[in-house]
Amino acid sequence: MTKNSPVWFIAAASSGFGHEMAMSALKRGHTVIATARKVERVQDLAEAGAHTMAFDVTSPLAVIETIAKEVFDKHGRVDYLVNAAGFILEGAVEEVSPQEVFDSFNTNVFGAVSTIRAFLPHIRAQPIAPNGVRSTIVTFGSLGSWRGGAGFSIYAMTKACVSSLAESLRDELAPFKIRSTTVEPGYFRTSFLNPGVMVSSKTRIDAYSDEATPTGQVRKRLVVVDNNQPGDVVKGCKVILDMLTGSGLAEGKDLPVRVVLGPDCEQTIRDKCSQSIAILDEWKELIRSTNHD
């Protein structure tokens, strides 16, 4: 790492995209602050040269603010603030409890908001980097940001939220030369769907376990897809790093508000856009009839 290398703060760097982004940034000579709820889970990143910290995005805001101050006291700036924390809650709406819904939003959405809120005062005060950008804030949406479905409605809701958050932040922070984007992967081969990682609702209703229902079919498919996802996380993280840093095939291009990864996610978005346009075309007369005379 060079003295003036870009600084990354990555929440949830113990596995999946957070881990591979940290490794990719380290290989580029960048300074990486890799975090996990238990610091021993990022020991391999420490051995690779990362600074490591225990960090839980669901901590009280005051705790996160203290951590943000520690980071800036030590490193002076954060060029890339990445929140990769998140999990899938599998369960039909009728099955999930209020606490399970809250826990999902607390990690996937509220934690991202708290982290960004705690770091922003320091980021706004730091000097602009040589690339003309003060910092870049990264949330993690998914294919589920674009399409909900039976059995994963709560997860899809949270992912739509963090994609919308990035879109809103893009406008709010533009005057301060701070960029915002959301990474939206399709199915990538991580531990995301592994037993013990994927969370299922404690309440199970036989009607939804029936494989003749959409929910039952999704449950069966998630088991089949686990460890067989088409996406390669290492390749995906190279694309993310190139797009965030404006290097490789992304050189000379502006960072989009959505970093879409995987042909499955691309197709989902294209289908959603086509279906939405079709709805507008079919109902345009009624849609346009609602203004005051």
Image: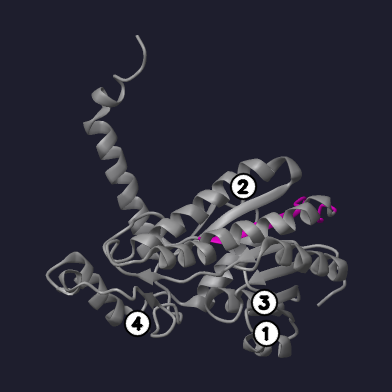
Label annotation for residue 211: none
Q: Height in image: 27 above or below 244?
A: below
Residue type at mark 3?
Answer: Thr
Q: Label 1, label 4: how many angstroms apart (C-alpha)?
A: 29 Å
Q: Which residue is mark 3?
A: 35
Residue 139 drawn in magenta:
yes
Residue at 33 percent of width and 76 percent of height: 202
Q: Position of residue 84 (x, y in %)?
A: 57, 69
Q: Nearer the viewer, mark 3 or mark 4?
A: 3
Residue type at mark 1?
Answer: Val
**Nearest the camera: 249 or 28?**
28
Q: Label 2, label 1: how many angstroms apart (C-alpha)?
A: 30 Å
Q: Label 3, label 4: how many angstroms apart (C-alpha)?
A: 27 Å
Residue at 50 percent of width and 49 percent of height: 164
**For mark 1, does the 10 Å Cα neighbourhood hold few (<14), some (14 to 19), or many (20 or more) residues?**
some
**Nearest the camera: 228 or 2?**
228
**For mark 2, does the 10 Å Cα neighbourhood hold few (<14), some (14 to 19), or many (20 or more) residues?**
some
Residue type at mark 2?
Answer: Leu
Residue 235 in the figure: left or right of residue 180 = left
Q: Of marks 3 and 4, which one's residue comes earlier in the chain? A: 3
Q: Label 4, label 2: how many angstroms apart (C-alpha)?
A: 34 Å
